[in-house]
Every structure is written in structure tokens, then in C-alpha cells.
């Protein structure tokens, strides 16, 4: 058996220098990242960034110009059948044979893979809450139902990696929330890694532990989401509401390591090291400054993402 | 192997679960019914037995022509419908090679064509029996089975060609159009070009093997063995192109 260069067994998906050129233009350009077991990772980028193209290459629907994709150590390029057996996916919209029932459609994919039992069909349809609609023809399904059936077909063969291309596209806010919840449930119940793309951070940030931002086919940045402890030296922005901002400013300017960013009559924004905040509060209090509010000004990830991707390009 | 039979079952179900599936067989029933009725009313000269009727009607120049047309309609859709529905994206991300998937599609297209040939042949015999109740004529069972075999060969060749056109164009309409158009125009073309000996290498000069049982050989010097070789070469070519293109194709 061919072994890949990676040795870390918990790496489920590995992209190394993945590149797609069409007509001389690099649509995906030297993309590299890893996803470990159990991770839910977002692939974020404005429309046309190359998310779908990247995912098509990951599942072997299109060839790669350069680089490689390894799934559980097997190359999609040279060992397709061994690699793809660990993957379930939906690229763009979930599409089925419209004249067949949901059940008949799932049976199609059952017959294509060794070892998928009828009990497994039942299990995945329950997981996505489709057990009552399975006897209907797919042409009568709503988009939300097709999304669920799509996820059911993707999970059928117990993959280690789920690839979902904009699964929230076309869903209403309630549908998006629901999708988020059952994807979380699936990640827990099945213990699999999920790569999910979106052009809207807000739609995936609540389910991802990490986002990878791409633009014009290139890697831009990656961010871990969720609470991170502030390091002591970290400089943060603080907004203060005080009785007399001018007085407070005079006091603060006498202190070290604090920068005043803006001041209005009763509000001011400052930059200060995390560990200096208690000193600031004590100093203001002893000088008789009345403090009504003290808040951290956080740049939301959305702001950050807008900045990274040039905001206006996001549809 | 279990996997491959699964693929075959899948392809058969994709055909047979369609509402239009029975239409093809129903058309054959209706056409042979009408023919039987017409022959019963008119009792044309030279046709005196069940076998005369059956052998004559399943010829390409008669009701037999319906069989390759119906077979081509289905073969055109085998790959192109997967594109149309978008299901190709689910089909090709399984632990199955593209070659195996395409092979299952081709095999089922051929099986379907043969099922139409057999249906037409059975209907021809049954209709002939109803009209003539046996009887004695010139035709033998050998004649009948030769015509049936010719019909099968002709259907397989055009199914294979249409299958390839479907893969190349990804368009159901184009595949049907080109498949049926070349059936129509092919024999005409051969007739027009029959004085050039190079014409015998044309696919269409060789598709109807029943000519070797009459004396209507399209180009001088052609033999049954020659035609079979030419057909095999063309079919091999069509299949090589189909499999090579389908294997490499980006599914966008
Ligand atoms: N087959 C193709 N030929 C030429 N350009 C393409 C092709 N497929 C995609 N593109 C281009 O590549 C870019 C990335 O597309 P895509 O991967 O669909 O982006 P995303 O999914 O992030 O919106 C787009 O600018 C698109 O126009
Ligand atoms: Mg896309």
C-alpha cells in the first residue's frame, strides 16, 4: 500500500500546494492546510474565491494542475478509490433523480459501496430527520429536504470527512439554524471531520472551530474561533463611559502605557495592556472620576473578514 | 464483483423507474398490432405465413426500424441525464472508478436495446400467428433469426455511437439528434457514394448485415466478414473515445 508523507494519524484531510489553472489563470493557487479528526473547519471566501473549485478537487470531480490532496493518507490523485471511500460530500446543490423516491435514491448509493446496510440507511435518515419523507418522490422535496437527503447520502458509508459546499445557500434563517444544529450533532454523533464552505462568516462561525480564509484562490489567513484567553501583554481596546471625559483624559495621560484613541464628552476609547486594567480603574477612582461603563471594544470576526477580503467584494 | 452488479442494478433502475419506460414497449405493441390488423384486412401477396410476417416486419426497412430509434433515445440519456439532473456529482464521488461506472451504463444501454429487439421479435411472431395461424410460406426460422440478429447488430452499433456522442456533448438532445439523423442519412449517403470503393469503409455501409442475405450489397466486393470487422473497429473506436474522455473529464 502507498503511504503518504504524513505520519500524523489524526490528519484526515491534507492539502499540499493544491493548484488549479484553467486557461492559464490560477483559480486555486497553492492551497495548503490540514484538517484533523473531529474538527469542523470553515472555508471562507467571497463569491468566486475558489471554494467550489477547491472542493471539487478534494473529491476528485476535477483534476488538479499541481499539488495533491490526501485523505486519511491516501492520495486522491493516484489512489482515488482508496481515498474517496472516506469522504462524503455535497458540492453546490444536492441533486437527486427527481422521479425516484428519497429512499430509492439512497438505495442507489447503498449499492455503490460495500457494507452499507439497510439499518444504516434508517440511521442516517433519522439523524437528518427525513424518515417521514422518504417515500415521496424527490421532485416534491423542498430545498431544505434535499439538503437533508444530501447529508444522508454523504453519511451513508460512514465517511471520516464530510465536504459541504455552502450548505446554507438558499435556506431561510430558521433553516440555517437547524442545519447548524444537526451538523454539530453529526460531528459529535459520527466523530467525523467537516469542511464547510461559505461566503458569509456569520452562517458558519457558530459551528466551526476554525476558519480558513481564501481569496482569488489564495490562502489569506486562518483563525481559531471561540473563546481564547487574553495573554497578559495583549493590548486591547477599552471604551469607558465616565462623568467627565476631559478630567479622565488628564488622569490617564499621567499614566504609563495607555493610549487615548478618541474622546467625546462622556465617552472615551483607549488602548491598554490587559494586565494594566485594574491599575487604571484604581487610578481613575482615586482621582474622583465617575465610571459608569467599562467595556472591551471587540473587532468582530465579520469586521476582520471584511477587512481581509476587501469587504465590498462580499456579495 | 458484487459492487459491479450493484452498478448494473442501479443503471437498470434509473431507466425502469421512469414513467416513460413502458412507453417504448407499448409503442412496439401498438405498431405490431396495427400491422397485424392491416395485414389481416389487406392480405398482401407473397406473405403467407406467421414466419413470413415476422421475418418481414422485424426488418430495418419495416417496423424493425423502431427498435434502434427507441434504443438510441435511452442510450443518449444514460450519461447526459446525470449531467442534466446534476446527479453526476454524487455518482462520481463513490469508491468506484469512472471506468466501471461507465461500463455499467454502456452494458445496460445494450441490455435495454436487446430487450427491445427481443420484444419486437416476440411481438412479430405473436402478431403473425394471430393473423396467419402458422401457414406455409417462403420464410424459415433461419431467415427470421438472421433478421433478428441484424437488427440487434444495427441497434448495438448506433447505441454505441449515440453513447459516445452523449459523453462528448453532454447534451441529450444532441446525442438523440445525431444518433437518429445518422441512421436516416447514413444509408442515403452510402447509396449516393456507392460507386467509390472507399465508401465500403464508412460505418453506414456496414451497419445493415441483412444485405448479405439478399443481393443488395452496397459496394461491390463487400463481404459479411469484412463488414463485421469494420463494425468491430468502429465500435472499439467509439468505446475507446468514450472511456478516455469520461475518465479525464472535469465535472464542473
Ligand atoms: N470551468 C471553469 N472555467 C473557467 N473559470 C472557472 C471555471 N470554474 C470556475 N471558474 C472561475 O473560478 C473562480 C472560482 O470559482 P468557484 O470555485 O466557483 O468560486 P466560489 O465557489 O468560491 O464562489 C471564479 O472566478 C470562476 O469564474
Ligand atoms: Mg461556490
Image: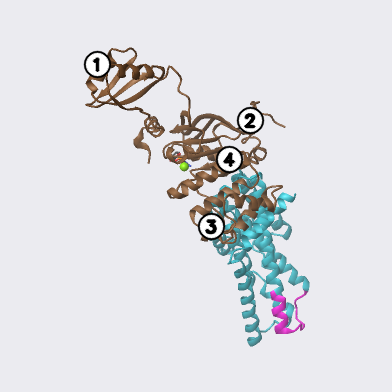
User: Which shade of the palette goes to chain A?
Assistant: brown
Of pointers 4 and 1, the one earlier in the residue sequence: 4
User: Do the residues at discs 4 and 3 belong to one chain?
Assistant: no
The residues tagged by marks 4 and 2 sit, at their Cα atoms, a distance apart of: 15 Å
The residues tagged by marks 1 and 3 sit, at their Cα atoms, a distance apart of: 79 Å
Is residue B194 visible in the rendered image? The answer is no
The residues tagged by marks 4 and 1 sit, at their Cα atoms, a distance apart of: 53 Å
| Residue ID at (75%, 71%) | B143
The residue carrying mark 3 is B172
The answer to whether residue A145 is above or below residue A54 is below
The answer to whether residue B207 is above or below residue A268 is below
User: Which shade of the palette goes to chain B?
Assistant: cyan
Is residue B49 visible in the rendered image? The answer is yes
Quadrant for the N terminus of chain A, please: top right
Q: How far from the left and from the top, in percent, is residue B34?
A: 62, 80
Dot 1: few (<14), some (14–19), or many (≥20) neighbours within 10 Å?
Answer: few
What colour scheme has been applied to the protein in the rendered image?
by chain
The residue carrying mark 1 is A250
Range shown magenta: B123-140
Q: Are marks 4 and 3 in contact (CB under 8 Å)?
A: no
Is label 4 or label 2 in front? 4
Q: Chain of mark 4?
A: A
The residue carrying mark 4 is A187
Q: Considering the numbered disc 3 on the image, is that residue within a helix, a strand or a loop? A: helix
Name the mark on residue A10: 2
Dot 2: few (<14), some (14–19), or many (≥20) neighbours within 10 Å?
Answer: few
Q: How far from the left and from the top, in percent, is residue A221?
A: 46, 28
Tell me if residue A233 is in the magenta stretch. no
Choose top left, top right, bottom left or bottom right for residue A90. Answer: top right
Amino acid at each position: 500500500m502507498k503511504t503518504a508523507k504524513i505520519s500524523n494519524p489524526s490528519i484526515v484531510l491534507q492539502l499540499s500546494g493544491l493548484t488549479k489553472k484553467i486557461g492559464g489563470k490560477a483559480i486555486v493557487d497553492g492551497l495548503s492546510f490540514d484538517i484533523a479528526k473531529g474538527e469542523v473547519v470553515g472555508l471562507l471566501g467571497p463569491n468566486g474565491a475558489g471554494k467550489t473549485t477547491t472542493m471539487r478537487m478534494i473529491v476528485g470531480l476535477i483534476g488538479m494542475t499541481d499539488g495533491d490532496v490526501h485523505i486519511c493518507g491516501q492520495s486522491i490523485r493516484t489512489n482515488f478509490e482508496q481515498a474517496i471511500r472516506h469522504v462524503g460530500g455535497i458540492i453546490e446543490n444536492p441533486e437527486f433523480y427527481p422521479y425516484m423516491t428519497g429512499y430509492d435514491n439512497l438505495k442507489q448509493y447503498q449499492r455503490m459501496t460495500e457494507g452499507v446496510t439497510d439499518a444504516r440507511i434508517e440511521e442516517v435518515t433519522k439523524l437528518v430527520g427525513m424518515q417521514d419523507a422518504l417515500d415521496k418522490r424527490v421532485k416534491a422535496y423542498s430545498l431544505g429536504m434535499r439538503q437533508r437527503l444530501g447529508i444522508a447520502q454523504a453519511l451513508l458509508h460512514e465517511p471520516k470527512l464530510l465536504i459541504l459546499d455552502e450548505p446554507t445557500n438558499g435556506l431561510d434563517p430558521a433553516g440555517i439554524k437547524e442545519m447548524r444544529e444537526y451538523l454539530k450533532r453529526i460531528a459529535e454523533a459520527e466523530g467525523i471531520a467537516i469542511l464547510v464552505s461559505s461566503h458569509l462568516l456569520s452562517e458558519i462561525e457558530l459551528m466551526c472551530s476554525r476558519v480558513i480564509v481564501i481569496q482569488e484562490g489564495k490562502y489569506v489567513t486562518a483563525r481559531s474561533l471561540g473563546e481564547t484567553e487574553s495573554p497578559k501583554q495583549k493590548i486591547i481596546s477599552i471604551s469607558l463611559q465616565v462623568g467627565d471625559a476631559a478630567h479622565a483624559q488628564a488622569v490617564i495621560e499621567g499614566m504609563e502605557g495607555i493610549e487615548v484613541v478618541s474622546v467625546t464628552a462622556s465617552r472615551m476609547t483607549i488602548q491598554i495592556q490587559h494586565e494594566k486594567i485594574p491599575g487604571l480603574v484604581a487610578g481613575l477612582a482615586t482621582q474622583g472620576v465617575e465610571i459608569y461603563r467599562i467595556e472591551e471594544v471587540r473587532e468582530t470576526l465579520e469586521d476582520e473578514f471584511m477587512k481581509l477580503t476587501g469587504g465590498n467584494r462580499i456579495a | 464483483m458484487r459492487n459491479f452488479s450493484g452498478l448494473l442494478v442501479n443503471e437498470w433502475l434509473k431507466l425502469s423507474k421512469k414513467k416513460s419506460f413502458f412507453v417504448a414497449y407499448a409503442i412496439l405493441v401498438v405498431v405490431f398490432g396495427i400491422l397485424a390488423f392491416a395485414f389481416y384486412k389487406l392480405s398482401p401477396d407473397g406473405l403467407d405465413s406467421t414466419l413470413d410476417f415476422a421475418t418481414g416486419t422485424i426488418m430495418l426497412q419495416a417496423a424493425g426500424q423502431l427498435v434502434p430509434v427507441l434504443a438510441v433515445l435511452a442510450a443518449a440519456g444514460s450519461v447526459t441525464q446525470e449531467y442534466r439532473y446534476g446527479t453526476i456529482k454524487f455518482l462520481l464521488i463513490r469508491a468506484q472508478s469512472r471506468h466501471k461506472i461507465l461500463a455499467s451504463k454502456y452494458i445496460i444501454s445494450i441490455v435495454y436495446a436487446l430487450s427491445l429487439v427481443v420484444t419486437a421479435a416476440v411481438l412479430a411472431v405473436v402478431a403473425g400467428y394471430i393473423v396467419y395461424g402458422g401457414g406455409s410460406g417462403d420464410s424459415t426460422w433461419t431467415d427470421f433469426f438472421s433478421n433478428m440478429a441484424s437488427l440487434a447488430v444495427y441497434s448495438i452499433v448506433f447505441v454505441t455511437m449515440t453513447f459516445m456522442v452523449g459523453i462528448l456533448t453532454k447534451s441529450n438532445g444532441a446525442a438523440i439528434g445525431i444518433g437518429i439523423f445518422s441512421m436516416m442519412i447514413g444509408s442515403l449517403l452510402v447509396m449516393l457514394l456507392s460507386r467509390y470503393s472507399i465508401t465500403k469503409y464508412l460505418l453506414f455501409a456496414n451497419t445493415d448485415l441483412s444485405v448479405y442475405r439478399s443481393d443488395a450489397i452496397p459496394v461491390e466486393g463487400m463481404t459479411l466478414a469484412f463488414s463485421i470487422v469494420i463494425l468491430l473497429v468502429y465500435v472499439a473506436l467509439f468505446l475507446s473515445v468514450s472511456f478516455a474522455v469520461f475518465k479525464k473529464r472535469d465535472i464542473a
